[in-house]
Image: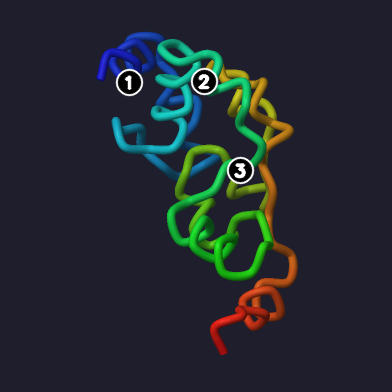
Amino acid sequence: MEIVRRWQEDGIPEKLYPLTRQTLWTGHPVSLLRWLKEHEPERYAQIGCVMMTHDYLRWCLTGVKGCEESNISESNLYNMSLGEYDPCLTDWLGIAEINHALRLLSDLPKSAGRSPLR
C-alpha cells in the first residue's frame, strides 16, 4: 500500500515503535483509516467509533460500542507506555480527526454478559 511506503520514507515507523511496540503494515487499522481518509473522505468523516472486528460483533450483540484494550493496543493507535490512546500517534499518521472515535470498553465482562442471546 502506497500509504505505508510513504510512512516508511518519512520515518514514521521509527517514531511509532518506541510508543506502540508495533510495526506498520497494510492491514493495520491506521493504514485502513488513512486510506479511507484519502480515497473515501465522506465515509471517513462519518466514522463514529473505531472498532476491531470482535468489538463490532460485541456491539451487534450488546449495543456497547468500544474496543477491548488487549486488541486495540495492537493497532498503532494506542501508546503502550501510557496505557491509553495518544493523540500524537494519530497526528504522525495524518488521521488526527479520528481521535473523537477512539473508545475503550472499561467494563468488558459486564457488557459482554448482556447479550440477548443468552
Q: Residue 35: name its quadrant.
A: top left
Near mark 3 (Cα within 10 A), the count class, few <14, some 14-19 or many ≥20, is many
| For marks 2 and 3 on the same chain, the one whose residue lies earlier in the sequence | 3
Residue contact between numbered discs 2 and 3, judged by CB atoms under 8 Å: no
39 in relation to 81, above or below: above
Q: Position of residue 66 (x, y in %)?
A: 65, 54
Please identify the residue farthest to the left as the structure is shown. 1
How many angstroms separate mark 2 from mark 3 (CA)? 14 Å
Query: In which quarter of the view is residue 32 placed?
Result: top left
Residue 104 to residue 99: above or below? below
Rendered-image quadrant of the N terminus: top left
Q: Secondary structure at mark 2?
A: helix
Residue 7 in percent (x, y) is at 38, 16
Residue holding disc 1? 4
Q: Give the residue type that dot 3 points to.
A: Asn
User: Local crowd at mark 1 within 10 Å, few (<14), some, or many (≥20)?
Assistant: many
Label 2 is placed on what type of residue?
Answer: Leu
What is the residue that sits farthest to the front in this orientation?
A: 116
| Residue in view at x 53 percent, y 51 percent | 73
Q: Quick one: label 1 or label 2, which is nearer the N terminus?
A: 1
> According to the image, label 3 marks what residue?
79
Q: Please tell me whether mark 2 or mark 3 is closer to you in this view.
A: 2
